[in-house]
Amino acid sequence: MRDDCITITLGLAEVRVIREEETATEIRVEVMYRARSAPCPRCGQRTPKVHSTRAQWKRDRGLRDKPVWLVLHKRRFRCLGCGHVFTEPDPVFGVRRRTSQRFRAYLGQEAIHQTVRHVARGEGVGEGLVRRCLTEEAQRLLEAPEKSPPARILGLDEFSIKKGQVYDTAIVDLEQKRIMGVVSGHRQEEVAAFFSALADPEQVEVVVMDKNEAFRQAVALCLPRAKVVADKFHVLMHVHQAVDRVRTSLQPQRGKKGEIFRARYLLLKGVERLAPEGRVQLFELLGRYPQLARAWALKEAFRRWYRSTTRKKAEERLVAWENSVRKHGPEPFQGLLSMLQTWRQDILNYFDYPYTNGFLEGKNNRIKVIKRIAYGYRNPANFRRRILLTNVKETHTKAA
């Protein structure tokens, strides 16, 4: 008898261990199901008569950095009632499966957080097996019944699957902080189809989005009570772009030289967040470039406008800001006036419903990380599935 080993539990109550062996590269365990009889699938009568037995090698979860192989002595029974020969049930592995269910679940869980290739190489299995395990685990997690209340505040934003080629739309519940769905495409009919499938579309009160006319039409068509709120950060982005166009028009050259080029950070960052030496540097620059000073002042005035306490004050202050642009605003700011007119009510709705897509932008960053880790996805459905699984991952993190 060996005196240099310990015994551990296999953790499979359905089988009994016949013998085990550990080599330098693997662990081999011979097992057999404990049941001494099996029900005949034809007549239902249980029979103890074994017709034949054969060994099947099945992969299980590794132990001590070694793969574990379970050599199952699989039996075929002959029914004493009808004479039918049949194979015993296989609950540990499944019909015609060469891996244990717990090993497949482990592969699927690992593939949620890592690339398929990394998991396959680490476990010494094929990428196809890992991909199938991920699909099975994702379906199990995503089909779990949700107890969340109907969504009231939605956020919409589009993102690219392949740069400049394919766009999808992420739809999130901004109150519950969860992705509700990923729509294939970013056109009106595609987003409207998702809205139409909601269990309680009349419960949606607010939809936050960037300035996307297709999204706005889909909301008007399918969500009768919802108010559209133009995302604050997308609106400010257009103002920042106007400042930057003024800056680039003053650059003496396109190269990365000169104080105008290096001033981009100072011009776009909020003045209250600048360090003292940064403020001094900024105001010295603005003193030398009056047109840039006007653009910067309009940008800061628009940022202050978003701090209006009521919608009525916001409407009055917006009119005053637009008049300032008409009188002495640089040309890039003149182009903002038509946008503010087209989306005026949706922009002003922010002061009744102060919601932004900040959480969704964070999700978009997570989506970019998922793409970078995998160096892109050839299967869009797999990509969307991984995005939805971020809900499950974050729920588990909070519970821990």
Image (cartoon, grey):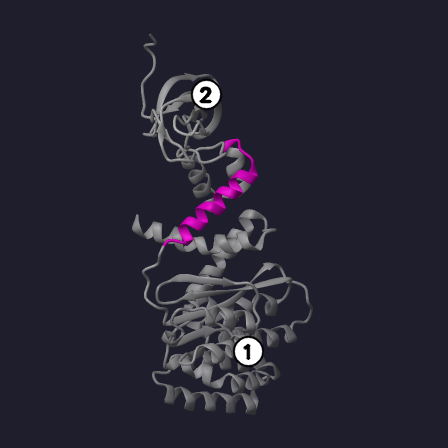
Dot 2 crowding, Cα within 10 Å, few <14, some 14–19, many 20+ = few
The tally of labels here is 2
Region of the chain picked out in magenta, as a range: 123-144
Q: Is residue 371 above or below residue 40?
A: below
- Residue marked by disc 2: 53
Q: Position of residue 373 (x, y in %)?
A: 53, 48
Pick whichever, 227 or 329, lies toward us: 227
Mark 1 is surrounded, within 10 Å at the Cα level, by few (under 14), some (14 to 19) or many (20 or more) other residues, namely few
- Is residue 142 found inside the magenta-colored segment of the image? yes
Q: Which mark is residue 119?
A: none
User: Does residue 218 appear left or right of residue 175 in this picture?
Assistant: right
Label drawn at residue 213? 1
The answer for how far apart the CA atoms under marks 1 and 2 are is 67 Å
Residue 51's image quarter?
Answer: top left
Q: Quadrant of residue 44?
A: top left
> Is disc 1 placed on a helix, strand or loop?
helix
Between 354 and 204, the one nearer to me in the picture: 204
Give the image quarter of residue 65.
Answer: top left
Tell me the chief SS of the magenta region. helix
Amino acid, disc 2: Thr
**What residue is shown at x 57% (from left), y 81% (from top)?**
290
